[in-house]
Each structure stands twice: as structure tokens, then as C-alpha cells.
Image (tube, rainbow, N blue to C red):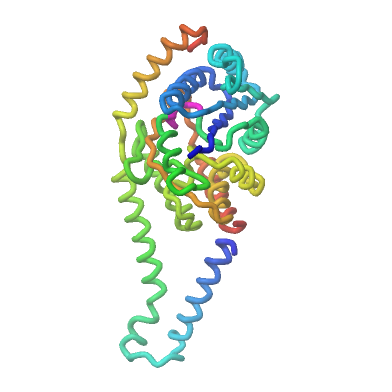
Amino acid sequence: MTRAQQTLSIGLLLSSIYMVAFLGLAPLPEKLQTDVIPVLPFWAIVTFGAYLLAKLGYGVLTFNDVPQAHQELVKQIEQARVELKKKGVEVN
Amino acid sequence: MAATKHKYSILLPTYNERRNLPIITYLLEQTFSQAGLDWELIIVDDGSPDGTQTVANQLIKAYNTRGAGGERIKLKPRAGKLGLGTAYVHGLQFVTGDFVVIMDADFSHHPKFLPIMIEKQREADYDIVTGTRYAGDGGVYGWDLKRKLVSRGANLVADTVLRPGVSDLTGSFRLYKRGVLEKVIKATESKGYSFQMEMMVRAKAMGFKVAECPITFVDRLYGESKLGGEEIAEYLKGVFNLWYKV
């Protein structure tokens, strides 16, 4: 099953369940039927969008910076140059 | 109890890496001899005009020895820029190890992580070990806010659309069992940027066991990194293509 098939199947399933609720085919408490069900899709999309944005922001903020790795590398490159020149390899 | 002897083959496609190649080779040699592991380096150069092959030959003279297992470095060039996927296929023909490492030649991927990845692989006989910049104490150096935003954004798109179960989908620092790499490459169709992504998604879909290893990614010290609007469009196309196909 491709991811496309997976996503579309789940989408279809959720849509069917929603349609049942939306068309009043299932016995639901009055408040739920009139106040919640009609706006559920929009609410779900907005919440999902907000969740993704939060994930992105969090990811960027907690992106690990590694200056020590850079310093270590620069040192190693110098070492490498010295050794390589000795072995007759041109560096730079 | 006799342990099977393992050999690690580094597949390094190069294009204009004259300055980086000797250093990365030096670091690889250091890492592997300190860890006491058997290794080889296969350089697949796509006809670089900057003298990469000359340096490769100097490295061969400097590091290869006569006798069993002495041919550490092999240069297997091609006539021109023929693409990353085919470079791997080409290089794979000359691999004599049972494990293959894919990495970048510009030391954004540091060989010091290889023993860690190898150890990780042994833990549960994983088929693939992939480096991640996003989890654990992985990280980057030299990335401004824009680059971080684009990178996280790209990974988020891929993560949401493809749900791959791997934290760093676009990374290309990986250790594969040789047979696994051969199978995955055969199934992969993308070119360019999407190639590494597709390999991972396909591998997961084929049921291979993948482990992750935090790595630090130090941005190019020499050379320009290419990331423009066109690349982003290509990337998004690649992700949706994978969503549809795999």
C-alpha cells in the first residue's frame, strides 16, 4: 500500500464518519449536533496547521549548534595537511 | 568464538573535490586504523576538471600497500557528470566489503561517527544506520536562521506527507549492509536531491531495519552550497512523487 493509498483510505474513512454525524444519521446530543459538528472540519484544519507551525518553530529554536565540532575539525584539517604533505599529496 | 571479519567500503562520488578529498581520506584512515577495522575507499569521480583525480592518484600512492587487503583506495572514474544514483551503482561493482558507507566528501559528514554507527549496527544487526542532525545530540554548525528554517520545514513536509519513521530523511550519511543497498538502489527511481530521500522511504517500505545515530554536520568549509527557490520546488515535487509512488 502506498502512502497515497494509506492517506486517502484514512481520509475516506474519516469523511464517511463525519458525513454520518453531519447528516444527523446518528443519534447525538443536541448541543453536539448543532454547535460542534458543523464546524468540526474547519477546527480540525486550523488546529492541524497550528500544530505544524508550532512543531516548526520548536524545531528551529532547539536546533543544536555545534561550534566545538567546527573547532575540532579545523584543527584536524591542519594536522591532515601536515601529514599529507609529508606523504607527497598536494593539499590546496 | 570466531567473529566474522567485516569490511567497510566507503562509496564516495566526487565532483570537484580536489581540496576536500585528501583531508577526508586522511580522516577516514585515522578513524579506521584507530578503531582496528578493515576498510576501503572507492572514489567515483565524474570527470572533475579541477584535478580531483590527480589528487586521488597521489593518495593511492601514499596509502595503498602491497599484499592482502592493501588496496585501500580505489579510483573508479567516469567520463562525465552522470548522476548520484548511477555513481553508487558504478561504485558498488568494485566493493569488496560486506558493508557500504555513503557520505559526503566535504567533511560535513565526519568519519569519527563511523565507529559509532558501526557499533549501533551491531547492537541488533540493523540493515541500515542513518545519521541524524535532528535527534539526540546531533546538530549543525554554520547554519543561519534561514537555513535552519528551510531545513526543518523541508523535513516537516516530508515527515507529515510520508511518515517515514526516521527523524532526518534528507540526510545522506548512512551505513548499509551491502545486499540491502543493492536492493534499495535497484528500486529507486529519483534523481538528484530526492534520491537519498527515496532510498530511505523505499528501504522502510521494503521492511528493512533502520537505526539512527546523532551526527554533527559542519557546513562546507570550502565551496558553495546550493539552495535556491528552484531546489525547493524540486524538493516538494520529489516528496509528493514519493507519496504517490511508494
Q: Residue at x 43, y 26 (%)?
A: B31
Q: Nearer the viewer, residue B115 or B139?
A: B115
Tell me residue B181's x, y (percent).
Answer: 59, 43
Which residue ends up furthest to the right in the rendered image?
Answer: B79
Q: Nearer the viewer, residue B143 or B185?
A: B185
Q: Main secondary structure of the magenta part?
A: loop
Please provide the residue range marked out in magenta.
B105-111
Residue B50 placement, left or right of B213: right
Magenta segment includes B100: no
Residue B74 placement, left or right of B37: right
Tell me residue B214's x, y (percent).
Answer: 38, 41
With respect to residue B41, does B130 lie above or below?
A: below
Q: Residue at x 43, y 22 (%)?
A: B30
Residue B51 visible somewhere in the drawing: no
Q: Residue at x 33, y 85 (%)?
A: A32
Choose top left, top right, bottom left or bottom right for residue B176: top right
Q: Residue at x 38, y 14 (%)?
A: A79
With respect to residue B141, does A91 lie above or below?
A: above
With respect to residue A8, does B81 lie above or below?
A: above
Residue B118 visible somewhere in the drawing: yes
Which residue ends up furthest to the front in the rendered image?
Answer: B1
Q: Nearer the viewer, residue A25 or B87?
A: B87
Magenta segment includes B110: yes
Tell me residue B92's x, y (percent).
Answer: 64, 34
* Labels in figure, total: 0
Q: Nearer the viewer, residue B60 or B88?
A: B60
Residue B232 placement, left or right of A58: right
Tell me residue A17's x, y (percent).
Answer: 47, 81
Placement of the N terminus of chain A among the 4 image quadrants: bottom right
